[in-house]
Image (cartoon, helix red, strand yellow):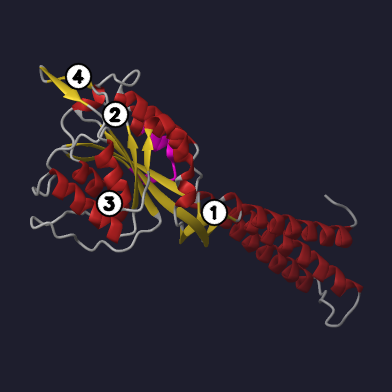
Amino acid sequence: MSFADPVLLAVGLVVAAALAWAAVAVARRRAAALAAAGVTASPGPGPGRGRDRARLGGVWFTIAGVAVLAIAVAGPAASVPVSRASGTVILAMDVSGSMAATDVTPSRLAAAKQAALSFIKVQPDRVDVGVIAFQQGGLEAALPTADHATAAAAVRRLKTGGGTSLGDAILASLSAITHKTVTVGRDGSAPNIGYWPSATIVLFSDGQDEAGASGTGTDAGTAAAASVAEKAGVHIDTVGVGTTAGSTVDVDGYHLFTALDVATLRSISQATGGTYHPASDASELDGIASSIDLRLTVTNQPLPLAGAFIALALALLAAGAVLTVARSGRVV
């Protein structure tokens, strides 16, 4: 059991101890005074004996009530295990230079952000949401958390810049899921990261890819990363942002043509058992969470006990008051 304010507990217990000491001291002085007057307590049952017990009972019940009340005001709480069915969704957001293209209004990145925010808004509390922004290499923007406002804020902060590595985006997302760095060997070998069927990656991109961190080339690097996800039971749902007609975008002073690569995004989703979604049908993303194999976790949560202690303190104080009235015939 823990206490929110141990100082109040200490002060309250000191007061209760002082009252107990005072009660004992008064009882001893009273006994000494009666002995000096030649009056002794009746050893057997009788009215006098009953009144003494009522008097002492009222005092000690009152002191006990004060002690329990001191515990209550200190904010006691117990840690109890609570089962929770939960899953993890990582939103992998492409913020490369091509996402500044305006073939969708007002831009590809703006459309992706709007779709991602809509997705976050409808997720239940049992789903932890994280955000990965990726250029050339994954950049972790927000760890998976049940606080969806944190993920939404991370999405709103995203800006374009740099190139895209879809393979690195997948590996960075897997690192966020497993809470350890996930890489692919130079020979393309895939690491064993365990089995994570309760996790899903939603990748928002135009599909424009560059060589990944594995150094094995665009297709090989992305395929190797997707293989790691597939073996770990992590589905990747891809969201295509842009048009196949394409558009030009200014990158470092150069005019570059860029178009939506549906084939690349569809191949990633198919390789991992996921689904490809056009950004125009972003409403379909709402059903992704329902397809996640939620895991059962046990977490310790604080259980406030102040109410129970207050009830006990009131019962003890009431008992003390009743005994006091029975002894003296008055409340005060």
Residue 3's spot in the image, x, y percent? 51, 54
Question: Separation of disc 1 and disc 3 at Cα?
Answer: 47 Å
Can you tell which mark lies on residue 9? 1
- The stretch of residues the image draws in magenta is 143-153
- Please rate how many residues cluster around mark 2, counting C-alpha atoms within 10 Å: few if below 14, some from 14 to 19, many from 20: some
Looking at the image, tell me whether mark 4 or mark 2 is earlier in sequence order.
2
Question: Separation of disc 4 and disc 2 at Cα?
Answer: 21 Å
Q: SS for tag 1?
A: helix
Q: Which of 101 and 320 is in front in this view?
A: 101
- The residue identified by callout 4 is 248
Question: Separation of disc 1 and disc 4 at Cα?
Answer: 69 Å
Question: Separation of disc 3 and disc 2 at Cα?
Answer: 20 Å
Question: Separation of disc 1 and disc 2 at Cα?
Answer: 48 Å
Q: Which residue shows up at 24% across the image and 41% down it?
A: 264
Residue 241's spot in the image, x, y percent? 32, 30
Q: Which residue shows up at 20% across the image and 34% down it?
A: 208
Dot 4 amino acid type: Thr
Q: SS for tag 3?
A: helix
Q: SS for tag 2?
A: loop
Asked if the magenta segment contains residue 94, the reply would be no
Looking at the image, tell me whether mark 1 or mark 2 is earlier in sequence order.
1
Q: Which residue shows up at 49% across the image and 57% down it?
A: 85
Dot 2 amino acid type: Leu
- Rendered view: 276 above or below 331: above
Dot 3 amino acid type: Leu
Q: Can residue 160 be seen in this view?
A: no
Can you tell which mark lies on residue 158? 2
What is the quadrant of residue 207 in the picture? top left
Dot 1 amino acid type: Leu
- Please rate how many residues cluster around mark 4, counting C-alpha atoms within 10 Å: few if below 14, some from 14 to 19, many from 20: some
Can you tell which mark lies on residue 174? 3
Q: Nearer the viewer, residue 64 or 254?
A: 254
